[in-house]
Amino acid sequence: MIEFRSVTKRFPGGTVAVDDFNLVLPSRKTTVLVGSSGSGKTTLLRMINRMVDLTSGTIEIDGEDTSALEPVALRRRIGYVMQNSGLLPHFTVIENVATVPVLNGVPRKRAFSDALALLDTVGLERSLADRYPSQLSGGQQQRVGVARGLAADPNILLMDEPFGAVDPIVRDELQQELIRLQRELDKTVVFVTHDIDEAFLIGDQVVILEQGGRIAQVGSPSEIMADPASDFVSSFIGADRGKRALSIRHTERGAVLVDGFGRAAGVLVEGVAVASVAVESEESTSS
Amino acid sequence: MNLIVDAIAWILDPAHYGGPNGIGVRLIEHLWISVVSLVIAGAIAIPAGFLIGHTGTGRAAAVLVSGGVRALPTLGLISILGLSIGIGVQAPIIAFVVLAIPSMLAGAYAGFEAIDRRIVDSARSVGMTEWQIVGRVELPLGLPLLIGGIRSATLQVIATATLAAYISGGGLGSFIFLGLRTNDYTQMLAGSILVIALAIAFEGAFSALQRLVVPAGVRAGQRTKVRSGSPRSAAEAE
Ligand SMILES: Nc1ncnc2c1ncn2[C@@H]1O[C@H](COP(=O)(O)OP(=O)(O)O)[C@@H](O)[C@H]1O
Ligand SMILES: [Mg+2]
């Protein structure tokens, strides 16, 4: 569990990026911070692994105040995946993935064989192990980034718009893989995005942010969709534009769901066991 | 034309190699003066450059100092230092250290500055210590530019080390100053040719080294980028 208590961040220039922020991020769940650019998402994420220092307040991980922990040691036990993969250009794929275990003193041989197994986990061919990042596609680089984030088997994985720079088809694929991975690995994931569809698809808990890191609403995707807390939230999730206001229209061939613009958005399937496919069902109602 | 032929004949004459004023001894003196100056300059400039590049502070001061130091005429500096600490090799070495520092400093911090800050940020966020960032990320990625700085400093020092002979410091400049005093233009020219040849030899070695130290992953990136253009440009890049 990660807990923010009255966290404020004022940058040297005077910008208050985050103002009195309070939030509990439950263990083994995916919390998505979603908001437009400049709302303080990255700042919030980077305060967790002390890449950014707090101006005031505390952040606790499993009850432990992070300000009492050594930043380097803290970062080594938290996976971090960033938008531009952040891979080291002069390290091969396998060296990149094994970076943190090697830093932690795991013998190179074992670190590398573990890293090979991780390539399988993130859906990469082992034959890519000796390539350099510049020889990979954007999607492959992001997968390597995820593998590197997982290499030290951290309990917490921080992801800052990890799929923001890849094309939509690859993004869909990576999102599905992340959902699969999360089901297998059961990490506490903190995921940052400005894309509300991505937030609803991936998040167990979604946090909608306004400027200054102010929380507009926290809840599960269905809670937020069913009951937007404010006009801001309605507008942000597209409810006011009719994008998520689905209604049933009966046609000759059967019933279809249409959105507020009258465009077909999907079909209603009855009798699906919702609990077991909760994530997918939310995806199909939201898109 | 004749003068050049004479000078080359002078250089090839075996009689000019032995003895305390032979080409052998003078060449070794020249190299020794240059290398000592460069090592001292490197010991000062490279750590300072790394510190500036890594922390991103002190750059303005470094530019100011480098600019000021660059404006100092080396011959004047040698004369002044010679007057205060006597003739010999110390005064020229100090002057050459001063000469070499700006290029090395610039190479060191430029090498660090040229690295994408996101790469450094990413190295820090996976848990590298500051020393590990310097050693495993900034140094290997900044090495080509650092070597470039050492290369231009070396060229300047080897060419300018000729002036050591001005106050009896030895080196290949001895032939030039001796020739000047005795109106022996052949010997003067021979000395100059030797200095030029030495500079070219170092230049060749450094340009090979500079290409060699580009990390494989960075080279791989350059190659794929070039290849995606035309096959011609790839051939030219090789
Ligand atoms: N290092 C910094 N120095 C000064 N201001 C910053 C810094 N990082 C972020 N900010 C400011 O803090 C605010 C929030 O930034 P950020 O957390 O990056 O937002 P987001 O990730 O949601 O786009 C912005 O106004 C940004 O300009
Ligand atoms: Mg951001």
Image (cartoon, coloured by chain):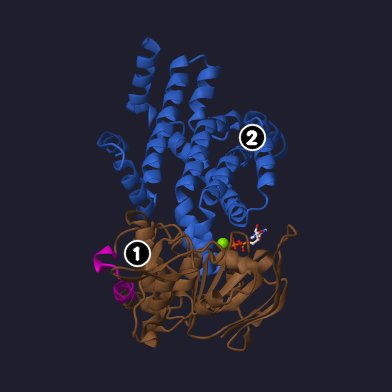
Tell me which residue sits at (70%, 45%) in the image.
Answer: B61
Nearest to the eye among marks 1 and 2: give it.
Answer: 1
The stretch drawn in magenta includes residue A268: no
Left or right: B79 in relation to B129? right
Q: Colour of chain B?
A: blue
Examine the rendering and report whether any part of residue A174 can be seen.
yes
Left or right: A277 in relation to A21? left
- Please give the label number shown on residue A93: 1
Front-most of residues B180 and A4: A4
Q: Colour of chain A?
A: brown
Extent of the magenta region: A115-129
Label 1: how many Cα within 10 Å (few below 14, some 14–19, many 20+): many
Can you say whether A275 is above or below A157 in the image?
Answer: below
Examine the rendering and report whether any part of residue A97 can be seen.
no
Tell me which residue sits at (34%, 45%) in the image.
Answer: B225
Q: In the picture, residue A211 is in which quadrant?
A: bottom right
Q: Label 2 amino acid?
A: Arg
Q: In the picture, residue B166 is in which quadrant?
A: top right
Label 2: how many Cα within 10 Å (few below 14, some 14–19, many 20+): some
Q: How many marks?
A: 2
Question: Residue A209: x, y in percent?
Answer: 62, 69
Callout 1: helix, strand or loop? helix
Front-most of residues A59 and A127: A59
Can you say whether A246 is above or below B180 in the image?
Answer: below
Question: Residue B214: x, y in percent?
Answer: 39, 49
Kindly identify which chain the residue marked by label 2 belongs to: B
Callout 2: helix, strand or loop? helix
Q: Label 1 amino acid?
A: Val
Q: Which residue is mark 2?
A: B70
Q: Main secondary structure of the magenta part?
A: helix
| Mark 1: C-beta under 8 Å from nearest atom of ligand 2 | no
